[in-house]
Image (cartoon, rainbow, N blue to C red):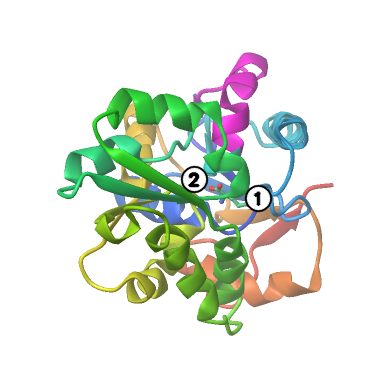
Amino acid sequence: MDASAPILLFDPGVGGLSVLGEVRRLLPDAPVIYAADNGGLPYGTKTEAEVAARVCGLLGRMSERYRPRLICIACNTASTIALAMVRDVLNVPIVGTVPAIKPAAEQTRSGVIGLLGTAATIRQPYVDRLAAEFAADKRLLRHAAGELVGAAEAKLRGLPVDPAIYARAAAGLRDQPGGMEVDTVVLACTHFPLVADELGEAFGPGVRFVDGAAGIARRIAHLTQGQPLTRSRPDFALFTKDEPGLAALAPALAQYGLGPDRTPAMEILT
Ligand code: DGL
């Protein structure tokens, strides 16, 4: 094992940073590449075929170029659609992100769980299977809240976000039959923990949010246990498209250890 082989975290945008935050806590010395397919963002409104093709193609190219020791698909949409396919084609350990329905079912007291994800995620059979396996005796209300992806992207660029976006996400669950009894909400998109405070205000007191980031970080720590970890270069963010808004992300990326403050540590995949 090359001690400088990175852990590659992949998401279409900034969402995977919510996972990187937990990975940093457990593995502060791990070399990391944060890969964002901003050229394909958002995935949540794409077809299954489009998402699968992008994820398999990009992860193939990235693993040839950067030789990661492990890839984390830090995106629920990509994982629920393409995790099995990526595992079939790449010879590197792959950790996926799946909606945290199991812990939510363990924590709810009212028995009514909300699930916020992208349109593509909430319709996946994978979610049906998780619900049947872990929450069969609970009520699971789903709502596609893709607008929150744009909200998280804007927030991390320091741009203003219309609070009505958060209110609409909360109302999407509250307005369903039984919605007022929701006490636990699964944030089934990695972008959503980045706006958890704003969502908390929109839902009001008495609602707990659950996401998979800490569990994913534990899984990564387990799979890399005992491996040597040395940085041969500073950790950086890799994008699939150069665009003017990227520079505005530098301070947020730096907070996650991707480059020094305000100095972009970024590459564009060519
Ligand atoms: N962060 C991604 C997820 O976890 C979704 C963002 C998108 O729609 O591209 O589902």
Residue 12 marker: 1
Q: Which residue is mark 2?
A: 31
Q: Is residue 54 left or right of residue 104?
A: right
User: Type of residue at label 1?
Assistant: Pro
Q: Is residue 239 left or right of residue 121?
A: right
Tell me the chief SS of the magenta region: helix
| SS state under label 2 | loop
How crowded is the residue under tag 1: few (<14 C-alpha within 10 Å), some, or many (20+)?
Answer: many
The residue sitting at 43% across, 44% down in the picture is: 30
Using the image as rendered, state which of residue 54 and residue 142 is in the foreground. 142
Q: Position of residue 263 (x, y in %)?
A: 62, 74
The residue sitting at 44% across, 56% down in the picture is: 18
Which is more foreground, mark 2 or mark 1?
Answer: 1
Most extreme residue toward the right, as rendered? 270
The residue sitting at 45% across, 42% down in the picture is: 230
Which residues lie in the magenta part? Answer: 78-94
- State whether label 1 is within 8 Å of ligand 1: yes
Indicate whether 93 appears above or below 62.
above
Indicate whether 2 appears above or below 144.
above
Q: Is residue 120 visible?
A: yes
Q: Position of residue 241 (x, y in %)?
A: 80, 56
The quarter of the picture where residue 249 lies is bottom right
Q: Position of residue 153 (x, y in %)?
A: 60, 67
Using the image as rendered, state which of residue 267 and residue 76 is in the foreground. 76
User: Type of residue at label 2?
Assistant: Pro
Numbered-mark total: 2
